[in-house]
Amino acid sequence: MAKLRGHITINAQLCKGCELCIVECPQNGMGLSQGMNQHGYHYAILAEDVCTGCTNCALVCPEAAIRVFRESKQKIPAPTVR
């Protein structure tokens, strides 16, 4: 079975650094940035490229700052019968 791949985008200016997404990431791929946003918060980042697109981070984000994208699955064409 092929592994699912995903990617997230985080609106750094909305993020308040609550770390809920970090705790909920089953791949342990998220962390807090070294820098701060305009409100003075360390914002969430994808620290390791291990995202599976599970959406846990987006579901728990109270600020709706995270968007999750899944890579489309490649379909293998069915063999033609002659």
Image (spheres, rainbow, N blue to C red):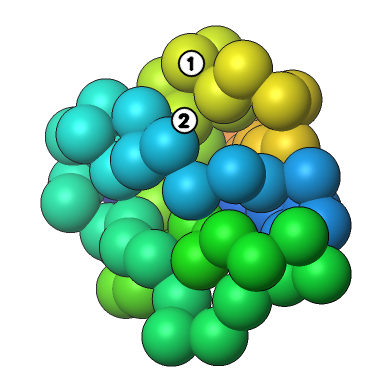
Circle 2 Cα neighbour tier, 10 Å, few/some/many (<14 / 14–19 / ≥20): many
Query: On screen, 29 above or below 38?
Result: above
Tag count in the figure? 2
Residue 22 visible in this rendered orientation of the protein:
yes
On the image, the x and y values in percent for residue 80 come to 68, 30
Q: Secondary structure at mark 1?
A: helix
Residue lying at 34% horizontally and 57% vertically, measured from the top left: 30
- The amino acid type found where label 2 is placed reads Cys
- Left or right: residue 50 compared with residue 66: left
Residue lying at 17% horizontally and 51% vertically, measured from the top left: 28
Residue lying at 26% horizontally and 27% vertically, measured from the top left: 24
**Quadrant of the drawing holding the C terminus:** top right
Residue closest to the eye, 42 or 72: 42
Q: Which mark, by number, is residue 57?
A: 2
Check disc 1 and report the residue beneath it. Answer: 60
Residue 79 visible in this rendered orientation of the protein:
no
Query: On screen, 8 above or below 67?
Result: below
- The amino acid type found where label 1 is placed reads Val
To which quarter of the image does residue 72 belong?
top right
**Quadrant of the drawing holding the N terminus:** top left
Residue closest to the eye, 30 or 17: 17
Q: Secondary structure at mark 2?
A: helix
